[in-house]
């Protein structure tokens, strides 16, 4: 197997206990050379795999500073409240706002430094009691990296339980189910924590190995270390970080507000301005992409960093190559399906996630339900089964292809490496320096994870036995089994490639097949099943951040659980308040300028739709190809393996059919597509050119500047959301002009 695709890299990792910055470890000679399996260009190492990241990008320094302090818990709790309350609040707003991890990271740092700087030092006081109290409160004391990580971890965990709270919102609004406080607490607790056990059990495979990098979080890790390790020595880098953040913040004002045309530059759209309407419609379908569901965005280019993000500066070259192949398939298949009139595609819009009647009118899910919220098959027979757009069918199909391919790809290509990783973890011989640096800290014992799972499992069991979820006990158990089966494969892919495969639609499809005509049962089934997968990936990702920054294992576990429960509780309390006080407006399909039930209405519509899975996707269904995608996907890696046997040099190509098929259809859910070519350009610049040609600059600045660009753009988006984009209830649009047209920003039809 190709070295870049290996789960475990046995390259010599040098001095695991060194406190030197990784950038200081480099040879003196210039030119291109290889030494100790590391490639050098002009004296700087080229980052090719996880072992290189561990040695040259992330420092193995550990100052032994405290992690769990009064200050870290308070800051984490405050910003958990901020992020979770804002998130649930804007579930019920016409404009959506999210608090990003990088934004939280910077907020925590600013307040942590202020806490250390503007509070009195204990040594200023003579009384030992006052000194003790001030030390406990961390007054006047250094704000360290581990405190920073713990506080940001707590804050970022606050929305882990959001899915369960949204289910309760749908219950209250559309079914008038007011579940008991016991049911609400137990179900929220169960859904929020049910997936943690898998990350704990699978730590030797998905966290410990050096190749499990979790690439998309590297900008955060590098930023943590640059902010806290030798800030004087890193002054030049931090200065560049500050300038990049400022420039990104100022620039974001233009594409996000004043010159929205920058969000989708299309030569073809501009060339078609005076063309006949039919021609403009075709051009908009193929080349338009700046607006939601406008078109494919072929050769469209975005200058809006909020859509590009540092992810594409961070994801490894092997991942991005596969995504580029997927994009090509996306362009070809979407055009072929629509213009080939597959599934009567031309009767419906080119791209839309809505449901339609056979004549092209919109299908209203509520028109086929009875007062109890279950399907009224008499009404359904009169109206007819819903139709999907070709883009939706293709999106669902590629998701299932990707899930199937994910399972067999991991088993075929990573089986031996997983066995080796497990053996190395048991013998404590895993060579990664960051793993070795964590051996001095006590592990969170396995029984902690198992005990948490037992509590979460029985909490969910009580809820289903009481019957308030309409989900039978056997359905609840199947949902957990489904999530537990897929989660390990998702974690391995995410760790190796920094990207995952969408699994939510599979959970909904299985729920609909098992519980036909019962949308609420499907919602609960999908929430439990998908949360097992999502939480496994989230916890594994944070455990890796903790390994890189040397936060003790037990603290990582405890704070993740604390943040999740705190956020879930706050989410639920805010949800109850809003639903009770704004019920009529939230049930209105239009809402008003302050409140909107569009998000929960969409959840309910999806639940009703998927409760028809047998009729729509079954053996006699119109879209049988969608579930068959799982079987086809399972076969794709076998075909890949067969080609390698016939043509051995193909082994050197970092192909992954799960990622290819995922990216061949995932864009159907994003709405706008103008960002695709921009991310390709960013990936080529970062991973294909800068990393290979100028590794010195890449190693020092690639991830740091990526974090700065994210922080700057997200800061301005957050401010604009409240100031002018309608998040505060009043929208103040920028005057319409050529650079900010009233129609599609790219000037397509």
Image (tube, helix red, strand yellow):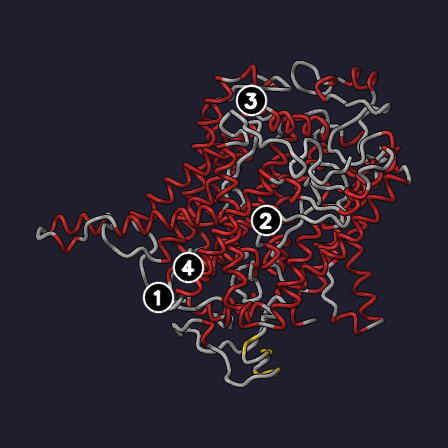
Q: Which residue is mark 4?
A: 443
Residue 544 x, y percent position in the rendering:
49, 58
- In which quadrant is the N terminus drawn? bottom right
Give the residue at the far left of this rendering: 126
Q: What residue do we see at 89% from left, 40% from top? A: 339
Q: Nearer the viewer, residue 718 or 436?
A: 718
Q: Earlier in the sequence, mark 4 or mark 1?
A: 1
Q: Which residue is mark 3?
A: 593
Q: Is residue 172 above or below residue 546?
A: above
Tags 4 and 2 in contact by the CB under 8 Å rule?
Answer: no
Q: Label 3 to label 2, Cα distance in Å?
A: 27 Å
Q: Earlier in the sequence, mark 3 or mark 1?
A: 1
Q: In terms of image quadrants, where is residue 442?
A: bottom left
Q: Is residue 347 left or right of residue 162?
A: right
Tags 3 and 2 in contact by the CB under 8 Å rule?
Answer: no
Disc marking residue 305: 2
Residues packed near mark 4 inside 10 Å, few (<14), some (14 to 19) or many (20 plus): few
Q: Which residue is mark 1?
A: 232
Residue 611 x, y percent position in the rendering:
72, 28
- Judged from the image, the secondary structure of the residue bearing numbered disc 1 is loop
- Judged from the image, the secondary structure of the residue bearing numbered disc 3 is loop
């Amino acid at each position: 197997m190709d070295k870049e695709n290996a789960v475990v890299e046995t390259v010599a990792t040098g001095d695991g206990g060194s406190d030197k910055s990784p950038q200081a470890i480099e040879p003196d000679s210039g030119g291109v050379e290889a030494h100790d399996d590391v490639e050098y260009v002009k004296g700087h190492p080229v980052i090719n795999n996880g072992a290189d990241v561990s040695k040259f990008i992330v420092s193995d320094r550990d100052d032994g500073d405290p992690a769990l302090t009064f200050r870290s818990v308070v800051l984490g709790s405050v910003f958990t409240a901020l992020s979770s309350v804002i998130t649930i609040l804007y579930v019920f707003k016409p404009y959506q706002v999210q608090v990003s991890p990088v934004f939280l990271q910077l907020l925590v740092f600013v307040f942590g430094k202020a806490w250390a700087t503007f509070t009195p030092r204990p040594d200023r006081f003579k009384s030992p009691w006052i000194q003790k109290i001030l030390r406990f409160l961390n007054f006047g004391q250094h704000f360290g990296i581990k405190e920073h990580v713990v506080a940001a971890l707590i804050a970022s965990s606050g929305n882990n339980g959001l899915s369960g709270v949204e289910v309760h919102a749908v219950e209250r609004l559309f079914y008038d189910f007011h579940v008991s406080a016991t049911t609400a607490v137990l179900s929220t607790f169960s859904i929020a924590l049910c997936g943690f056990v898998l990350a704990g059990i699978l730590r030797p495979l998905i966290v410990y190995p050096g190749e499990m990098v979790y690439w998309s979080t590297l900008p955060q890790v590098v930023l943590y270390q640059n902010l806290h390790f030798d800030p004087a020595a890193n002054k030049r880098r931090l200065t560049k970080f500050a300038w990049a953040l400022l420039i990104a913040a100022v620039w974001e004002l233009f594409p996000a507000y004043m010159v929205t045309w920058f969000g989708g530059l299309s030569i073809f759209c501009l060339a078609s301005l005076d063309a006949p309407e039919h021609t403009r419609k075709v051009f908009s379908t193929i080349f338009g992409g700046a607006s939601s569901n406008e078109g494919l965005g072929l050769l469209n280019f975005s200058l809006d960093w909020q859509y590009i993000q540092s992810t594409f500066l961070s994801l490894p070259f092997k991942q991005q190559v596969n995504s580029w192949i997927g994009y090509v398939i996306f362009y070809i298949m979407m055009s072929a399906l629509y213009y080939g009139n597959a599934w009567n595609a031309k009767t419906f819009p080119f791209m839309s996630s809505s449901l339609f009647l056979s004549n092209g009118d919109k299908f209203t899910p509520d028109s086929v339900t009875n007062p109890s919220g279950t399907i009224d098959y008499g009404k359904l027979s009169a109206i007819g089964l819903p139709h999907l757009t070709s883009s939706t069918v293709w999106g669902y199909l590629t998701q299932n292809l990707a899930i199937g391919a994910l399972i067999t790809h991991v088993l075929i290509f990573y089986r031996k490496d997983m066995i080796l990783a497990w053996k190395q973890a048991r013998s404590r011989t895993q060579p990664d320096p960051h793993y070795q640096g964590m051996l001095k800290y006590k592990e969170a014992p396995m029984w902690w994870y198992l005990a948490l799972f037992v509590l979460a499992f029985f909490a969910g069991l009580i809820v289903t036995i009481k019957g308030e979820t309409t989900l039978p006990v056997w359905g609840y158990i199947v949902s957990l089994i489904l999530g537990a089966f897929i989660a390990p494969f998702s974690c391995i892919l995410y760790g190796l490639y920094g990207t995952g495969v969408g699994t939510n639609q599979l959970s909904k499809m299985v729920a609909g097949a098992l519980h036909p005509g019962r949308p609420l049962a499907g919602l609960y089934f999908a929430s439990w099943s998908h949360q097992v997968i999502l939480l496994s990936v989230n916890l594994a990702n944070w455990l890796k951040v903790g390994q890189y920054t040397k936060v003790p294992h037990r603290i990582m576990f405890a704070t993740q659980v604390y943040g999740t429960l705190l956020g879930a509780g706050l989410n639920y309390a805010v949800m109850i308040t809003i639903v009770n006080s704004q019920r009529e407006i939230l049930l209105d399909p239009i809402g008003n300028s302050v409140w909107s039930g569009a998000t929960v209405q969409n959840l309910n519509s999806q639940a009703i739709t998927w409760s028809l899975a047998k009729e729509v996707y079954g053996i006699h269904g119109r879209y049988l190809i969608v579930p068959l995608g799982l079987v086809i996907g399972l076969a794709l890696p076998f075909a890949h393996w067969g080609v390698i046997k016939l043509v051995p040099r193909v082994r050197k190509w970092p192909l992954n059919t799960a990622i290819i098929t995922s990216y061949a259809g995932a864009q159907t859910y994003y709405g706008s597509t103008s960002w695709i070519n921009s991310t390709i350009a960013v990936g080529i610049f970062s991973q294909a050119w800068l990393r290979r040609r100028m590794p010195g600059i890449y190693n020092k600045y690639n991830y740091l500047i990526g974090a700065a660009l994210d922080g700057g753009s997200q800061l301005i988006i957050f401010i604009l959301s409240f100031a002018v984009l309608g998040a505060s209830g009043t929208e103040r649009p920028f005057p319409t002009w050529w650079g900010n047209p009233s129609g599609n920003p790219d000037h397509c039809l």
